[in-house]
């Protein structure tokens, strides 16, 4: 369909289902050329796609989320997400009965979370609790996207991001929000997952949460140390490195250090790990665990 975004945009709003389906499929192809993104946004495509997220037709919903993911891959598109308040309606598709629609929705949100304003938008939309709950039920592929999104939301220094935008909203720390909604207990469970990627990401998320005192003590109460100690010997290097880093954070609490002194010999084995990043993580862990005030 050799039409510009303006024509496509009119067709996206058409009452005829077949017209909407063709338009959204055509738009999807059109947007894969980065040069077309700005043009599409200028004619109001973002608002039209937002409205199509509630379409009764599964193809239209699925393709709309795919279009939004492609738009979200570009800085101008991420700005449009925030400007048009697209995060909440996309997140409603986390409950879609069609796997691909849910996956596309999570891909779009994960992409938005990669920048501080986007991550802040996700935290402000009160989605951390929703994401944590979805970790319990989602398929493996989507679980990884959720863990990545949580990872970015917890890394953002929302206080700074808000000051930079001169906004007057009270800062909501992603890390503390994650603790409040019970994220830690879910992440600890995922340390026993069969997928190395899920284990690595869960340990990585715990490492970030346990930077805060509140996070450390919540993880200790959730008995995070035993599974993390087990993962120190995991065959996947990223799992080993992230587990060691999480244990390092936990050993900064006196209770954590006391427990980890019993496991320090197991960690010392990895001072000579074949992967330099793991050996370095082990070195730091041992230094912090054996530190004497």
Image (tube, rainbow, N blue to C red):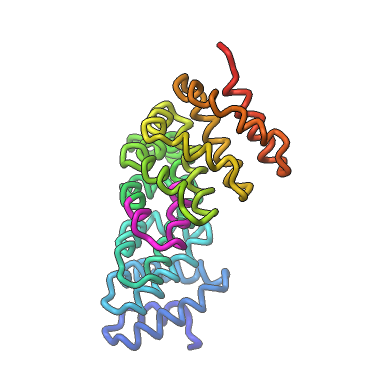
Q: Quadrant of the C terminus?
A: top right
From the viewer's side, name the closer residue of 76 and 216: 216
Above or below 50: residue 215: above
Residue at horizontal 34 percent and vertical 67 percent from the top: 50
On the rendered structure, is 245 left or right of 192?
Answer: right
Whether residue 74 is visible, yes or no, is yes
Above or below 181: residue 5: below
Task: Please tell me in which quadrant of the rendered image residue 33 appears.
Answer: bottom right
On the rendered structure, is 149 left or right of 85?
Answer: right
* Residue 223 rendering spot, x and y as whole percentages: 40, 34
Q: Residue furthest top?
A: 293
**Residue 10 belongs to magenta span:** no
* Residue 128 rendering spot, x and y as whole percentages: 35, 47
Residue at horizontal 59 percent and vertical 27 percent from the top: 264
On the rendered structure, is 237 left or right of 189?
Answer: right
Above or below 242: residue 100: below
Residues drawn in magenta: 133-150
From the viewer's side, name the closer residue of 277 and 82: 277
* Residue 56 rendering spot, x and y as whole percentages: 26, 77
Residue at horizontal 39 percent and vertical 28 percent from the top: 217
* Residue 68 rendering spot, x and y as whole percentages: 43, 66
On the rendered structure, is 209 left or right of 59?
Answer: right
From the viewer's side, name the closer residue of 241 and 118: 241
Whether residue 164 is visible, yes or no, is no
Residue at horizontal 40 percent and vertical 40 percent from the top: 174
**Magenta: predominant secondary structure element?**
helix
Above or below 204: residue 90: below
Q: How many marks?
A: 0
């Amino acid at each position: 369909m050799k039409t510009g975004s303006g024509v496509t945009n009119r067709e996206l709003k058409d009452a005829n289902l077949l017209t909407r389906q063709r338009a959204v499929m055509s738009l999807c192809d059109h947007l894969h050329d980065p040069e077309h993104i700005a043009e599409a946004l200028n004619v109001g495509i973002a608002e039209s796609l937002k409205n199509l997220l509630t379409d009764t037709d599964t193809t239209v919903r699925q393709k709309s989320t795919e279009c939004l993911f492609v738009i979200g891959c570009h800085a101008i598109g991420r700005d449009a997400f925030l400007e048009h308040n697209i995060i909440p309606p996309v997140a409603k598709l986390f409950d879609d009965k069609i796997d691909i629609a849910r996956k596309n929705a999570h891909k779009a949100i994960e992409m938005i979370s990669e920048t501080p304003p986007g991550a802040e938008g996700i935290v402000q939309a009160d989605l951390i609790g929703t994401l944590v709950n979805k970790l319990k039920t989602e398929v493996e592929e989507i679980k990884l996207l959720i863990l990545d999104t949580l990872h970015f939301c917890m890394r953002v220094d929302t206080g700074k991001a808000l000051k930079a935008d001169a906004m007057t909203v009270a800062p909501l720390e992603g890390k503390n929000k994650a603790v409040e909604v019970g994220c830690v207990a879910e992440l600890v469970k995922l340390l026993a997952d069969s997928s190395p990627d899920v284990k690595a990401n869960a340990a990585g998320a715990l490492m970030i949460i346990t930077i805060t005192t509140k996070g450390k003590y919540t993880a200790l109460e959730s008995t995070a140390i035993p599974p993390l100690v087990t993962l120190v010997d995991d065959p996947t290097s990223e799992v080993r490195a992230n587990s060691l880093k999480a244990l390092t954070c936990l050993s900064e609490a006196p209770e954590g250090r006391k427990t980890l002194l019993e496991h320090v010999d197991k960690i010392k084995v990895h001072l000579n790990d074949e992967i330099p990043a793991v050996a370095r993580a082990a070195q730091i862990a041992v230094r912090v665990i054996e530190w004497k005030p």
